[in-house]
C-alpha cells in the first residue's frame, strides 16, 4: 500500500485545506492533487494515496475526493487500475503510446510509423507557434522536422515546436531515443524529459502536396494529404507542443474516439 510518508507533500496539500471558500470542495481537492503532480510529489506511473487517505488529509469526505479524482481520470491525468488503485498517467509504463495517434488504416488498425529526424534547432518562435504555446513571439523554442515512414515507405512529415523549458537539452542525438520508445514521440518526451502529454486539441485539413512534400514522399504534386494541426498540453493545461503533421491520405482515415 502506498504511504503518505513516502512523499514530500507540497504546500497545497498541507492543512489547513479549506482556504478557497468560494470554490466547491471537490475543485479545491482537484487543484491540490494537480499541484502535487505538477510539483513532482507524485510522478508519472506512480500511485496516488487512497481516497480515504486524501479525505483525511484534506479534512473532507471521501465523496468529495472521489468527485475530484473522477474528473482527473476523465481528463486523462489519472488512471484507475482495477484492484491496484489510481495512478498518475504515464506513457512509459501504462501502454498509452497510441492514445493521441489519429491516423489509422481503413480497416481500423492503428498505424505504427517510423521517422527520420531531418533537423533539430532552437529558433525564435514564429507567430503561430507562440500563440499556440501561449508565449511571447520570438521566445526561443525547439523546432523539429521529421520525415515519417510507413512500412519503410515515405508517407509524410512532422513539424514540431516545443517550449524550451519543457525539453531542456534536446538535440538530434537525443532524438535517436524515439526509436527506443517504439516510435512514440510522447513516450520519448516522458522517458527522456519527464514531460507527460495529457490532452491535445486537433484541427484537420485536406491538402494537396506542394513541391517540397511531393519530393519528400516521391508522389506527384497535388497528391491528397491529411494535415493535422495540434496543440498539446501537460499537467495543469500548460501548452508545451505545437505540431503540424502531414500524412499521405492513401489508405488512411482519421480516428477521434
Image (cartoon, rainbow, N blue to C red):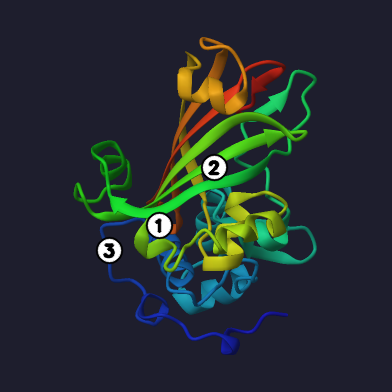
* Horizontal and vertical percent position of residue 56: 52, 77
What residue sits 71% from the left and 63% below the top?
93
> Would you name the residue on which mark 2 appears?
146
Q: Which mark is residue 21?
A: 3
Name the one closer to the observer, 212 or 84. 212
Q: Which residue is mark 1?
A: 236
Real-space Cα distance between discs 1 and 3? Answer: 21 Å
Dot in front, 1 or 3: 1
What's the CA distance linking mark 1 and mark 2?
A: 28 Å
Closer to the chain start, of discs 3 and 2, is 3
Residue at 80% x, 20% y: name it. Answer: 107
Give the crowd class for mark 1: few <14, some 14-19, many >=20 residues within 10 Å: few
For the N terminus, give its image quadrant: bottom right
Residue 189 shown left or right of residue 2 in the figure? left
Foreground: disc 1 or disc 2:
2
Q: Secondary structure at mark 2?
A: strand
Amino acid at each position: 500500500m502506498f504511504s503518505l510518508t513516502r512523499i514530500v507533500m507540497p504546500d497545497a496539500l498541507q492543512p489547513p485545506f479549506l482556504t478557497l471558500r468560494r470554490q466547491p470542495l471537490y475543485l479545491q481537492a482537484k487543484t491540490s492533487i494537480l499541484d502535487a503532480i505538477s510539483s513532482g510529489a507524485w510522478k508519472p506511473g506512480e500511485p496516488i494515496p487512497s481516497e480515504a487517505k486524501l479525505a483525511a488529509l484534506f479534512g473532507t469526505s471521501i465523496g468529495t475526493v472521489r468527485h475530484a479524482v473522477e474528473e482527473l481520470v476523465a481528463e486523462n491525468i489519472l488512471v484507475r487500475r482495477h484492484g491496484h488503485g489510481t495512478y498518475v498517467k504515464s506513457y512509459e509504463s501504462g501502454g498509452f503510446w497510441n492514445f493521441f495517434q489519429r491516423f489509422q488504416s481503413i480497416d481500423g488498425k492503428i498505424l505504427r510509423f517510423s521517422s527520420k529526424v531531418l533537423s533539430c534547432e532552437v529558433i525564435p518562435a514564429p507567430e503561430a507557434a507562440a500563440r499556440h504555446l501561449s508565449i511571447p513571439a520570438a521566445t526561443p523554442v525547439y523546432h523539429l522536422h521529421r520525415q515519417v515512414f510507413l512500412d519503410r515507405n515515405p508517407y509524410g512529415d512532422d513539424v514540431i515546436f516545443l517550449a524550451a523549458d519543457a525539453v531542456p537539452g534536446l538535440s538530434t542525438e537525443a532524438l535517436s531515443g524515439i526509436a527506443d520508445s517504439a516510435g512514440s514521440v510522447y513516450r520519448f518526451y516522458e522517458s527522456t524529459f519527464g514531460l507527460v502529454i495529457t490532452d491535445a486539441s486537433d484541427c484537420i485539413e485536406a491538402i494537396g502536396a506542394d513541391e517540397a512534400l511531393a519530393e519528400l514522399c516521391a508522389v506527384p504534386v497535388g497528391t491528397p494529404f491529411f494535415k493535422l494541426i495540434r496543440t498539446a498540453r501537460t499537467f495543469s493545461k500548460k501548452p508545451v507542443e505545437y505540431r503540424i503533421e502531414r500524412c499521405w491520405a492513401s489508405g488512411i482515415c482519421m480516428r477521434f474516439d
